[in-house]
Image (spheres, rainbow, N blue to C red):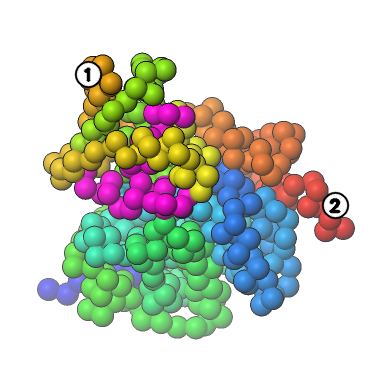
Amino acid sequence: MAEPNVTRIVAGWATSLDLADIPAEVRREGVRTFVNWLGCAIGGADHETVDCALAGVRPFAGPPQATVLGRGERLDVLHTALLNGISSHVLDYDDTHLKTIIHPAGPVASALLAVAELRPVTGRDLLAAQIVGVEIACRIGNSVYPDHYDRGWHITGTAGIFGAAAAVGRLLGLDEQRMCWALGIAATQASGLREMFGTMCKSFHPGRAAQNGALAAFLAEAGFDSSERAIEAPRGFANVLSTKQDYAEITEGLGERWEAALNSYKPFACGIVIHPTIDGCQQLREELRDAVREITEVAIRAHPLVLELTGKTGLEGKFSVYHAAAAALLRGDGSHSAFTDEAVNDPALVELRRKVKVTTDPKVHEASVDLTVTLRDGRRVSRSIERAIGSLERPLSDQQLEAKFRGQAVSRLSEGECERLIELAWRLPELERAAEVARAAVPSGAREAAR
């Protein structure tokens, strides 16, 4: 039985959907996704990973077309998409589609806002394109997850590029044929290895997906062709990169069942599977108070994914359940300050980390954990987390998203600049020029230096 022409179905839907066809609650979640992504991009702007990336690409960058958020440097659209995608992901604080562990806004929004500085784009059109891009990235992810991820592919990079290509393709006004080509050009570039977790390359994946997804759309606009069955063909994306291919996850219920409405936002700046541990350890800290210094053992029972890495650097620490538990118990911290080189090498945290014992059980849900701490006097205190804060069952409120935004932006923007940017981001659907957001995301000092 021949497979349906998945690529063409996706292309037709992406080009024909109108924002008015998107339910109000999905549009609202799209704005929340944009607000969260913007705060994360600014929050990561001064990370050494972004410094290194900028130093590496700047000699080869084209004309100053778009803004590196939170900094002010202006590069060509494609390199700007790369840099903003890197900065939005480097703190591991970004959005997460929990069914696939895709961080969809990094590839999609980073590409879109860069393009919006090159060509006039309304906030309404950018929002519609973002929702389409996120939806397509997550649906393609659904079709191959978990086999694709278990094999070692970083699904944010591999599926995210489809979202970026479709989103930018919408802004460029591609017809169905050219959108097919854009998706094919994206498919042949889909990459990203989980081996890179704990290094600068992890954030390179969404950045590259943003850059190459935008490139795919621009090439297709110019008539550059590709296979029209790049997703489902025997030698296409799904069959080459996965042992699972569930095409119904991509095509069924398009415009009726919304993966974009299932996006979630991290309260902690680390790998999502560690969040239940941090949540539980913070609750234990509140109960134990000074007695946390009397802990002799921390017993954790969790899903096997928590043992992704152990970590001796800040970036590796973001995937260390041992470090995350110690930081949450001793410092009550799960923000980006808990995952610096200094924090990972803090002697007090190192000492407590050695007392953490982890038992993994595939029967434990990825978003759950059982914790028991033993104190010097023999007392034991336990906590079970069914779903961590930030999950779909316990989502961050708009006010919590704003607080998270402020906590990240404070190192780059003044209080007034931060409040102005938050207000603009929430009003995205009303903006005549979406590029206004990028201009407002430049610190005043950087603007003055550029004059």
Marker disc for residue 448 = 2
Of the 4 image quadrants, the one containing the C terminus is bottom right
Give the Cα separation between the discs numbered 1 and 2.
Answer: 61 Å
73 on left or right of 127:
right
Q: Measuring 54% from the left and 35% from the top, which residue is drawn there?
A: 404
Q: Which residue is mark 1?
A: 378
Please state the extent of the stretch shown in magenta in the rendering: 303-331
Queried whether the magenta region covers residue 77, the answer comes back as: no
> Which of 103/173 is in front?
103
Residue 98 in view (yes/no): yes
- Say which quarter of the image contains residue 52: bottom right
- Asked if disc 1 and disc 2 are in contact, CB closer than 8 Å, the reply is no
Of the 4 image quadrants, the one containing the N terminus is bottom left
Queried whether the magenta region covers residue 320, the answer comes back as: yes
- Say which quarter of the image contains residue 368: top left
Point out the residue furthest to the right here.
451
Residue 61, image x and y in percent? 67, 74
Q: Measuring 43% from the left and 29% from the top, which residue is drawn there?
A: 330
Marker disc for residue 136 = none
Q: Earlier in the sequence, mark 1 or mark 2?
A: 1
Identify the amino acid type marked 2.
Answer: Glu
